[in-house]
Image (spheres, grey):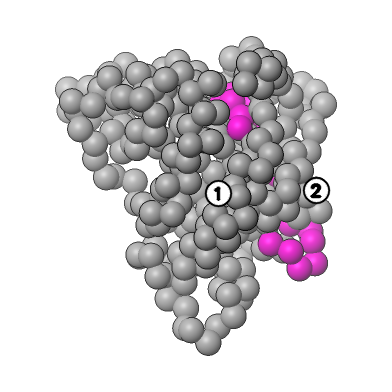
Amino acid sequence: MQQRTTDYQRRGYQILPGVIDPDLLLAVRAEAIAICRGRRGDVPGVTAAGSDEDDDVVLRRYLCIHFPHKLSPVVRDLARHPAVVDVLTAIIGPNVKMMQSMLFIKAPGKPGQSWHQDESHIPTRDRSLTALWFALDDATVENGCLWVVPGSHRAGVLHPVRHQVDPRFDGTPEAYGFEPAGEGAVPVELPAGSAVAFDGHLLHRSFPNDHPSRLRRSLVFHYMSAASLLPWLPPGPGETMATADCRDIVVVAGTDPHGARGTVDVMQPRLRVDRST
């Protein structure tokens, strides 16, 4: 674990082979189908699919569903799987909370995401933001795996972002101002059941799924230190940006030093904007 942590600090990411065993992988894939069929609760824009529709047809309608852990106990349990907790506590520390999950389907022809840093969208006070990206299918260059710029997290710089209209990518704002843009980027190809953990400052992107038939399903969770405040939403009454703390969280390891504030349910499951449709 010490070597793994050292590699993570140096490169900003760490591949975790075989985190999901075959039975759990099948269960999570089944949950993805159930969510996309509307069987786990309402998601605006997701239509309840008839039983005569093929699963593959249903899945290919959607690019990404945000907050599936609020719909599925299976997804929620994966976010705090013992193997996951071991990795997170080594990287972040003993007290860890989760604030976001995303289910990517990414059928053939669906877009990727332009260069970005997760901490530009989910700010922490202590640079503890960490993503875990689980491959539910083999993730390859052809079907749109992640690309990362190793070491791009170390300076702690959050690059400016701008709107982009490149049809290869979805509506996620694009990071810019780093030169040479993307030099040294490497693909993160993963077999199904494996995962990659990466730092919230790490530059990463993905390209469209160009495989003629294969999906690129993945589950992504975002975590941070439970000791840090989460200024994800505009400050409420009596708050400033220095004291704002989104309490829509799930503690996955240790304790929450701010637990007396309780939790709230403000983030609702939703579809990601898909410019390819």
Spot the residue most to the bottom.
52
Few, some or many C-alpha atoms within 10 Å of disc 1 (few <14, some 14-19, many ≥20)?
A: many
Q: Is residue 106 above or below residue 78?
A: below
Residue at 81% x, 53% y is: 142
- Amino acid type, residue under disc 1 in the picture: Leu
Q: Nearer the viewer, residue 134 or 183?
A: 134
Q: Is residue 274 visible?
A: no
- Amino acid type, residue under disc 2 in the picture: Val
Quadrant where the N terminus is found in the figure: top right
Task: Say left or right for 15 vs 35.
Answer: right
Quadrant where the C terminus is found in the figure: bottom right
Which quarter of the figure has residue 73?
bottom left
State yes or no: residue 203 in magenta.
yes
- The residue pinned by badge 1 equals 219
Residue at 40% x, 57% y is: 72
Helix, strand or loop for the magenta stretch, by majority: loop
Q: Which residues are magenta?
A: 197-215
- The residue pinned by badge 2 equals 141
* Residue 137 placement (x, y as % from top left): 68, 56
Dots 1 and 2: beta carbons under 8 Å? no
Question: Quick one: SS at disc 1?
Answer: strand
Residue at 54% x, 21% y is: 91
State yes or no: residue 199 in magenta.
yes
Question: Quick one: SS at disc 2?
Answer: loop
Q: Earlier in the sequence, mark 1 or mark 2?
A: 2
* Residue 184 placement (x, y as % from top left): 82, 26
